[in-house]
Amino acid sequence: MIVIPAIDILDGKVVRLKQGKFQEVTVYSEHPFDIAQQWISHGAQFMHIVDLDGAATGQIKNIVLINNIVRYTKAQVQVGGGIRDLDTIQRLISVGVSSVVLGTKAIEDKEFLKKALEQWPDKIIVSIDASHGKLAKEGWTSISLINATDFAKELQDLGVKGIVYTDIARDGMLKGPNIDGIKSILDAVDIPVVASGGISNLNDLKRLKELEKEGLRGIILGRAIYERTLSLREAIEFCSQRE
């Protein structure tokens, strides 16, 4: 099971939000590239970057920073936030991003998603951000009436190769992952799932590691590694163990 440290960028700084709320922001660094290098030095081979400026405005804002991280760290970088057109996907892939994470646009425009999958079938991941089992969109500022599990099945049928599942009620709260919510997604699809939200300690990792055999491919770590309630190096070592 892979471990992916998150770098959320807002106004050029590394931040974490509580439950996706922009008014609940904590700044951890003014230098995203330095944070990326730090995570690489701790053993990370993957990176999850969210352009929060893009998520809020619908237009990606931090592509220069993203380009520098991709170019100089050599990590496999997946990027989300504000990706609402094919040109933006092309720009990100052209700078070396390994996967593009679609959110709101994939929910609202299936034709767009189909076109993206036709052009980049192995580069598109869709983010399922859920609150009480319902999809959130528009930077988590709006909750839809769409069931997360139904959407996951639809994504698989369309040919999506991977899902990032986040329980936004848990995200940034360090109160443990929503195991039942993750299981519901794993039960619904056969494609790889990466889980995010609420992970705070080694015990949480042990519970998630048990889901690996059910299709959980990896986890995204955020506030836990910034607040140091969990060591990224130890998390990578633990999750890489074979049973």
Image (cartoon, helix red, strand yellow):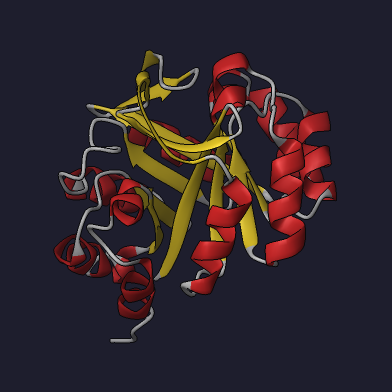
Q: Residue at x 39, y 43 (%)?
A: 165
Which quadrant of the structure image shows residue 102?
A: top right
Residue 91 position, x and y percent, is: 83, 39
Could you tell me which quadrant the C terminus lies in?
bottom left
Query: What residue is drawn where x is 23% and y is 42%?
Result: 181
Viewer-proximal residue, 53 or 122?
A: 53
Drawn side of residue 46 relative to residue 71, left or right: left
Q: Quadrant of the N terminus?
A: bottom left
Tell me which corner region of the image, top left, top right, bottom left or bottom right, holds residue 112: top right
Number of callouts: 0
Residue 190 appears in the figure: no
The answer to whether 209 appears left or right of 127 in the picture is left
Image coords of residue 160 (percent x, y): 59, 46
Where is residue 208 drawn, in percent x and y? 24, 62
Q: Residue at x 19, y 67 (%)?
A: 202
Residue 201: x percent and y percent? 19, 60
